[in-house]
Image (cartoon, rainbow, N blue to C red):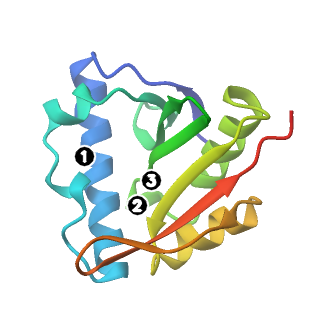
Amino acid sequence: MPQLRPLDLTDDATAAAVHAVGLASYAVEAELIGFDGIPALREGLEAMRARPLRWLGAVTGDGAVAGFLAWEETPDGVSVDRLCVDPARFRRGIASLLVRHALAELFPGRPVEVSTGADNAPAVALYERLGFTRGADFTPVPGLRMASFTLRGTA
């Protein structure tokens, strides 16, 4: 199982690896939900690096980024911006590992919000399995239906 560690996107190799995993992961999601206009698919490396996010990576023994979770702090808790796994490593528990660690170690007891494509069945199942409550679906742009989830803090 990969080791979890903070990712430093000021490091060029790390940023490039994160960007590549994100593009590959979002390409799979685009296929699942039938919508190729996911903003992160068109986000360049520098734009990704400029986002005010914190990054947690799942890194293999040889240093490859297997997946990552990125979030931002909000006045009310935490907003997960992206959870991506290298498609070559799907179905190995990496997304669960990242989210469980973040909930227990990085923002325990704090409310957490996340959204995903409503037709992204693996992501929807993951959030439901981890105790998130599904809220109202929403359509930020025509053709894209998103599912929202919250996990209330238990401090």
Q: Is residue 92 visible from the viewing direction of this image?
A: no
The mark nearer the N terminus, 1 or 2, is 1
**Relative depth, front residue between 151 and 122:** 151
Give neighbour class at mark 1: few <14, some 14-19, many 20+ (Cα, 10 Å). Answer: some
- Amino acid type shown at disc 2: Ala
Task: Indicate the position of residue 3 as horizontal and vertical percent values.
Answer: 60, 32
Task: Indicate the position of residue 48 as horizontal and vertical percent values.
Answer: 24, 35
Label disc, if present, on residue 90 of the rendered structure: none
Q: Are marks 3 and 1 in contact (CB under 8 Å)?
A: no
Give neighbour class at mark 3: few <14, some 14-19, many 20+ (Cα, 10 Å). Answer: many
Q: What residue sits 48% from the left and 36% below the top?
A: 71
CA gap, disc 3 and disc 2: 8 Å
Q: Secondary structure at mark 2?
A: helix
Q: Please name which of the two marks, 3 or 2, marks the residue nearer to the observer.
A: 3
Q: What residue sits 52% from the left and 42% below the top?
A: 79
Q: Secondary structure at mark 3?
A: strand
Which part of the image, by quadrant, shows the N terminus? Answer: top right
The residue wearing badge 3 is 85
- Amino acid type shown at disc 1: Ala
CA gap, disc 1 and disc 2: 12 Å
Give neighbour class at mark 2: few <14, some 14-19, many 20+ (Cα, 10 Å). Answer: few
Task: Indicate the position of residue 20 as horizontal and vertical percent values.
Answer: 25, 46
The residue wearing badge 1 is 20
Q: What residue sits 38% from the left and 19% below the top?
A: 8
Q: Above or below — where is 128 with respect to 78?
A: below
Q: Secondary structure at mark 1?
A: helix
- Amino acid type shown at disc 3: Val
Label disc, if present, on residue 88 of the rendered structure: 2
Left or right of 36 on screen, residue 130 = right
